[in-house]
Image (cartoon, grey):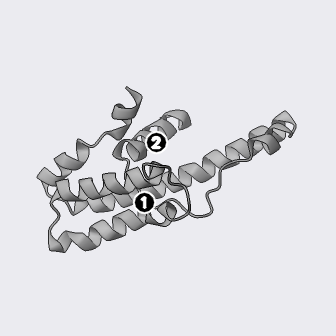
Amino acid sequence: MTKLRKFIVIGLAATGLGIASVSAFANRGHCGHDGGFYGRMEKYQARLHDKLKLTAAQEAAWKTFTEKMQPPASAARPDWSALSALPAPERMEKMVTMMKERETRMEGRLAALKEFYAVLTPQQQKVLDAQQVWRQRHG
């Protein structure tokens, strides 16, 4: 599988599920009038939790999963104006470095998803499989 395809597959898996624990970000002022992106993600996460009908024994796995899915505090947005000021080879090197860092974070999220998925019942797995937020947003 080419790297690009791997990025796409991992990206769709992470984005498709749309699961990220965002309570830390919701309090950072990133919320708009409707709670913003992070507020919507918290609501989505709560709805997913309810749909899964987790048992008391699965709650610890859910908590661990949502913590591992949390975006790192150090993941700052790229400074595109600074990047555009670099010579083309240096700019591409920076972009490749950023892609590798993102791939590493996404692989960590994939591992967290697999760990959580393993503790679900087949019915709960079907519920989780049906969650495809990216289709709702992107056609």
Q: Which of marks 1 and 2 is nearer the N terminus?
A: 2
Image coordinates for residue 104, horizontal then vertical, percent = 55, 54
Counting the numbered discs, the total is 2
- Residue placed at 57% from the left, 50% from the top? 102
- Rounded to the nearest angstrom, the CA distance separating label 1 from label 2 is 13 Å
Instruction: Indicate the position of residue 95 as horizontal and vertical percent values.
Output: 70, 42
| Label annotation for residue 100 | none
Q: Is residue 5 above or below residue 48?
A: above
Residue annotated with mark 2: 11
- The amino acid type, in three-letter code, at marker 2 is Gly
Residue at the extreme front of the image, as rendered? 33
Q: Residue placed farthest to the top in the image?
A: 139
Q: Quadrant of the C terminus?
A: top left
Residue position marked by numbered label 1 in the rendering: 69
- Residue situated in front as seen by the camera: 71 or 13: 71
Q: 26 and 108: which one is in front?
A: 26
Q: In this view, does 47 lie to the left or right of 34?
A: left
Q: Where is residue 89 in the image (x, y as percent from the top left)?
A: 82, 37
Residue found 33% across the figure and 54% down from its top: 43
Q: Which of these two is toward me, 111 or 127?
A: 127
User: Callout 1: helix, strand or loop?
Assistant: helix
Relative to residue 49, is residue 13 drawn left or right? right
The structure residue drawn at horizontal position 44% and vertical position 43%, both measured from the top left corner, is: 10
Q: Is mark 2 on a helix, strand or loop?
A: helix
Residue 84's place in the image compared with 40, above or below, is above
Mark 1 packing: few (<14 Cα in 10 Å), some, or many (20+)?
many
* Along the viewing direction, whichever of 72 and 120 lies nearer the viewer: 72
Q: In this view, does 26 lie to the left or right of 94?
A: left
Question: Where is residue 111 drawn, in percent x and y?
Answer: 39, 58
Q: How crowded is mark 2: few (under 14 residues within 10 Å), some or many (20 or more)?
A: some
The amino acid marked with disc number 1 is Met
